[in-house]
Amino acid sequence: EAEVAQSPRYKITEKSQAVAFWCDPISGHATLYWYRQILGQGPELLVQFQDESVVDDSQLPKDRFSAERLKGVDSTLKIQPAELGDSAMYLCASSFGLAGYPSYFGAGTRLSVL
Amino acid sequence: DAKTTQPNSMESNEEEPVHLPCNHSTISGTDYIHWYRQLPSQGPEYVIHGLTSNVNNRMASLAIAEDRKSSTLILHRATLRDAAVYYCILSKDRDDKIIFGKGTRLHILP
């Protein structure tokens, strides 16, 4: 069964360093999402891509976060510089991008900022 | 955006059916009802979705009220592996964006 791949699974970094997360969606899925999940809360949508274009990044802290999906396939989420409050699970999801179709999630990257 | 209301937590005994309720009184005619669940230390997992009619799949059943203002996720025979946070989510027509609320934490008692 096809899966959304994310790497790394775990990342420990120091405050003010740069970090990057990678996501490879299910083949053929036009829509890709990045979510952030703080422990004990539901996932929060950060950015939505339709192919290579950003559809919604209203909740992305653009002073330090950036996301790209250059060829409309895999995607990278970057944080520079990382802050203590960025410690969370970062989840990637993909879907066909059509109403009523489900989204499929990766296992996530657990970020710890020291 | 239409919102959903779910109980914070529920308990059920192993091997018994579980009915997880969700209220969505401001749902619009083209909103889909989705259910996802998240097991500990994993990403969310799609469970089921529907528009107007009841739906069944290998994981669960979705019962949608006639006025669509509420729905119920039914796990027919709960196992310990069903212990998770269950999210009821509405998505709009032409936008399959999934916005999570707080969900219901389901505890399964052996």
Image: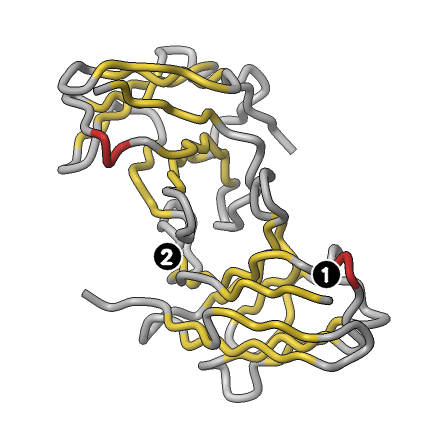
User: Which badge, 1 or 2, is on the more N-terminal residue?
Assistant: 1
Q: Nearer the viewer, residue A112 or A59?
A: A112
> Which chain letter matches label 1?
A
Q: Residue at x 58, y 34 (%)?
A: B101
Question: Can you name the residue that lies furthest to the right here?
Answer: A63
- Label 2: which residue? A104
Farthest residue, direction top: B66
In the rendered structure, which amino acid carries the disc numbered 1? Asp
Instruction: Tell me which residue sits at (55%, 24%) in the image.
Output: B4
User: Left or right: A28 with respect to B33?
Assistant: left
Identify which residue, B21 or A111, lies in the foreground: A111
Q: Nearer the viewer, residue B21 or B31?
A: B21
Q: Which mark is residue B96?
A: none
Q: At 37% from the left edge and 42% from the top edge, which residue is drawn?
A: B39
Tell me which corner region of the image, top left, top right, bottom left or bottom right, holds residue B76. top left
Q: Are marks 1 and 2 on the same chain?
A: yes
Position of residue B38 measured from the top left corner of the image (x, y, whole percent)? 40, 42
Expressed as whole percent of the image width and height from the top left, the position of residue A6 reads 43, 72
Is B17 on the left-hand or right-hand side of A58? left
- In the image, B101 versus A27, the foreground residue is B101
- Residue A86 got which mark? 1
Residue B37, placed above or below residue B25: below
Residue drawn at the location 57% of the way across and 87% of the way down? A70
Q: Label 1's element?
A: helix
Mark 2: secondary structure: strand
For disc 1, the neighbor class at 10 Å (few under 14, some 14 to 19, many from 20) is some
Q: Which image quarter: residue B74?
A: top left
* Quarter occupied by the N terminus of chain A: bottom left
Furthest residue in direction bottom, as rendered: A71
Q: Position of residue A7 (x, y in %)?
A: 46, 76
Vertical relation: A38 (above or below) B12:
below
